[in-house]
Amino acid sequence: MNNRVYNFSAGPGVIFEDVLKKAADEMMNQNGSGMSVMEMSHRSKWFEDIINGAEALLREVMAIPDNYKVLFLQGGASSQFAMIPMNLKKNGKADYIQTGVWAKKSYQEAKKFIDCRVVASSEDKTYTYIPETKPEDFNKDADYVHFCYNNTIYGTKFNGEPDVGGIDLVCDMSSCILSEPVDVSKYALIYAGAQKNMGPAGLTVVIIREDLIREDVEPYVPVMFRYKTHADNGSMYNTPPTYAIYICKLVLEKVKELGGLEAMKKINEQKAAMLYDFLDSSKLFRPTVSAPYRSLMNIPFVTGDKELDAKFIKEATEAGFVNLKGHRSVGGMRASLYNAMPVEGVAALVGFMKDFERKNA
Ligand SMILES: *Cc1c(COP(=O)(O)O)cnc(C)c1O
């Protein structure tokens, strides 16, 4: 009935069709208001229901403890790279684990505000693995340890939180939030740009332990860059990204309907296994990440021949499997299997790849 493609984009990524349909249905008249969400005041009763509903659903789905605040911000995950050191600085030191370009950028930005250190890095092998760390590696006086759970560009992920010996943990979960359960109580702060797994671009979600929302940040910190500003005003100090928050709420409703994060994890493991199993047995394609570090969300692979990679991407696109080109910094292919990618999409992609292999091996 429709002419939609299978969209393997790393971000902005695929959104559940049910969400898009509901948003389309409600476009002209949101909940009896006679207008769309984009046109209504963020102070209206209708929008209050939306933002409160989104927060309640996120708290429920992620089992966020009561001593954490949920903030709906703007500026992307990239603004958090600065906002985190500006707000969490106390002793003036921070430790970073560097597992990719995003993790590196977060470190480079933080250096402007706090004395930071790279404790471990996988840059030596173009970030194709997760470096080992021990609690003793970290500075006991560090205000926090920052890491990136899922490395979108390279397709690696941590298997559980690194043991940092009780120092506050800060995590970029942009490309894996809502993909599996997390024990929020192990973190001081979790942040994510919404455009991978939570909805459209323009919304950044921050989950922060209340004691870290401080008044006594340095005077230079702009009002908009203080967590306290947003926490004190229910994320409505200024106009929040209203439409993105609305779509995020619909995404959370869908995730809940599917059975929550335990169920998402099962489906995501199933989808990823379909592609990894094929890649591991293929004579033409090979995965670029070894088993212990493999992401469920972003799966890079290559043929080993640049021209063949280009041919594959071209033919896949023509067949309706789009955005399979790897990040410009690594080349090859990358299939992002976010929550909203249906199992049938992965099955169809594997079928297409088998076909391509037969014709080109
Ligand atoms: C996409 C991404 C970012 C950048 O997000 P913006 O919202 O564009 O700033 C940061 N970290 C990770 C892990 C990402 O996947």
Image (cartoon, grey):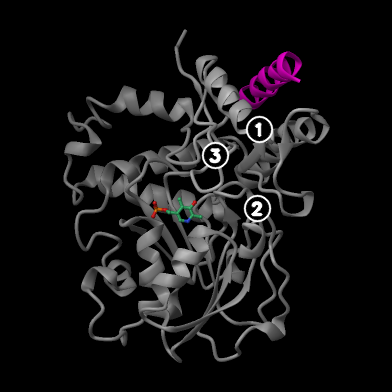
| Image: magenta residue range | 343-361
Using the image as rendered, state which of residue 196 and residue 248 is in the foreground: 196
Q: Nearer the viewer, mark 1 or mark 2?
A: 1
Task: Count all numbered tags in the image, as a single digit.
Answer: 3
* Residue 171 horizontal side relative to residue 21, left or right: right
Q: Position of residue 181 (x, y in %)?
A: 64, 53
Q: Can the viewer see residue 234 in this picture?
A: yes
User: Which badge, 1 or 2, is on the more N-terminal residue?
Assistant: 2
- In three-dimensional space, the C-alpha distance between marks 1 and 2, rounded to whole angstroms, equals 22 Å
Residue found farthest to the right? 281
Query: Residue 183: which quarter of the image?
Result: bottom right
User: Which badge, 2 or 3, is on the more N-terminal residue?
Assistant: 2
Whether 347 is among the magenta residues is yes
Label 1 sits on what residue type?
Answer: Asp
Q: Is residue 246 positioned above or below 136 on the image? A: above
Q: Position of residue 4 (x, y in %)?
A: 46, 18
Q: Helix or strand or loop: what does disc 1 sit on?
A: loop
- The residue to which callout 1 is attached is 305
Q: Helix or strand or loop: what does disc 2 sit on?
A: strand
Label 2 sits on what residue type?
Answer: Thr
Circle 1/circle 2 CB separation < 8 Å: no
- The residue to which callout 3 is attached is 326
Label 3 sits on what residue type?
Answer: Gly
Circle 3/circle 1 CB separation < 8 Å: no
